[in-house]
Amino acid sequence: MHWSGIQQRRSSWQDGVLGTNCPIPPKWNWTYQFQVKDQIGSFFYFPSLHFQRAAGGFGSFIINNRPIIPIPFDTPDGDIVILIGDWYTRNHTALRKALDAGKGLGMPDGVLINGKGPYRYNDTLVADGIEYETINVHPGKTYRLRVHNVGISTSLNFRIQSHNLLLAESEGSYTVQQNYTSLDIHVGQSYSFLLTTDQNASSDYYIVASARFVNESQWKRVTGVAILRYSNSKGKASGPLPDPPQDEFDKTFSMNQARSIRWNVSASGARPNPQGSFRYGSINVTEVYVLRNKPPETIDGKRRATLSGISFVNPATPIRLADQYKIKGVYKLDFPNKPLTGPPKMETSVINGTYRGFMEVILQNNDTKMHTYHMSGYAFFVVGMDYGEWSENSRGTYNKWDGIARSTTQVYPGAWTAILISLDNVGVWNLRTENLDSWYLGQETYVRVVNPEATNKTELPMPDNALFCGALSKLQKPQDVSSSLATSIIEGRSKLFFTVLMIASTLFLVSC
């Protein structure tokens, strides 16, 4: 189970991906234990193995400010989670088999909103009898909407009929507050909006999540529709949906919208000092990586996805576990700073990060579809994006003052996005595309950050319940699965214990 955006400070052991954790065996339970004291915001969790996220198992994870630290807006009258994502009626094993056979996934069968299908806004496109989501509100109130794209590979435009969305937070960072009539939310991204219920409630209102960066006329069925219902509503929603952005011939519209999302440098986050007190723009870069992706290609007879010409192969023994036991040959610490010029290859190649270094990563998307990229262990600064090939001259366009700090960023087709990362969190951290199909096909790597002076102050010891697999499988003891399960929260130190036995959609709420 991966906790997307949770930084797992000093403990990549808890990150829940193959580079750090052995898989939890069937019918076993395993307890994650981690602290969130230096974070606030809206995140989500999901199963990270074998395309399982396509079957569900995801949920929201909220970290609240401590009471002594004010939030940069009036306390909302309610807090509402909205999970949006594309959906296939085929199960995740069938989708996996299609990818293994060298095929694409094809068009999704729809978009779910909080696990439910679309309201019947159109008798031709939507069958009768489908259960849909209804969000009940009162007039004259302000609600915080936490919207997460938990889908497989489709960017979605989110909008609410006749209402503005005041952006307030993204993946743990408070933003400069500004209104949007709609916002593109890409796979793996999370946003908080403030919604004011200031309409006349002549009828219910549509909540829409529709596919973007596809042939939208052919993808009309890939639209999620829920209902916003005022307590004094006078009737059902009817008529056409609110229009998506009319930018078929303006490829800069969405990118300019993304550029407009900026860090609120005067707001306090998890700590009392303003977010902007970390002046990332004045720090010297110590290492630069240009990561280029391309459309899937054939390597050794298999259809694979690559980063800089390398398709990542997950080792049988997790990287962090191999380091702990000094097992050689599990991975290579040789990921290139620039894309390979020769034929692509399949390797377990890892980036060698420098502890307390400051890394610049350019994500160059030479594919024809939208990608989003996520890095575990950190909130990076999104400092620039543009169409075309990145060059050193592109640094002149960087935002060095209030670029948003987040864990997942979009990279437009035929474009680049530049991020800056302060490597202050020791561990082995996954850097991947969030598009599940490309991730499954190998478009990922890890950044290994080691303190040369081993100390528990920068990395916690290996947990007592660590699982063993691969070259260390003989160390694994059988588990007594009859023991009772417990989930507890120790608020005094913001330490969380989550026992995972089965996958279920649940919301976790904690105070930081």
Image (tube, helix red, strand yellow):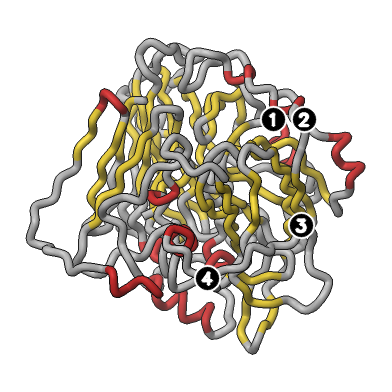
Mark 1–mark 4 distance (CA, rounded to whole Å): 40 Å
Give 465 or 505, whichever is nearer the viewer: 465
Identity of the amino acid at label 3?
A: Asn
Report the residue at 33% width, 56% height from top: 57
Give 469 or 2, whichever is nearer the viewer: 469
Q: Earlier in the sequence, mark 2 or mark 4?
A: 4
Q: Secondary structure at mark 2?
A: loop
Q: Which mark is residue 328?
A: 4
Q: Secondary structure at mark 3?
A: loop
**Number of callouts in the render?**
4
Mark 3–mark 1 distance (CA, rounded to whole Å): 24 Å
Q: Which mark is residue 22?
A: none
Which residue was labeled with disc 3?
337
Identity of the amino acid at label 2?
A: Asn
Circles 1 and 4: CB atoms closer than 8 Å: no
x, y percent for residue 478: 18, 69
Which residue was labeled with disc 2?
399
Identity of the amino acid at label 4?
A: Lys
Which residue was labeled with disc 1?
403
Q: Quadrant of the C terminus?
A: top left
Q: Quadrant of the N terminus?
A: bottom left
Q: Secondary structure at mark 4?
A: loop
Give 216 or 495, whichever is nearer the viewer: 495
x, y percent for residue 250: 80, 46
x, y percent for residue 88: 44, 67
Mark 4–mark 3 distance (CA, rounded to whole Å): 23 Å
Q: Is residue 140 left or right of residue 193?
A: left
Circles 1 and 2: CB atoms closer than 8 Å: yes
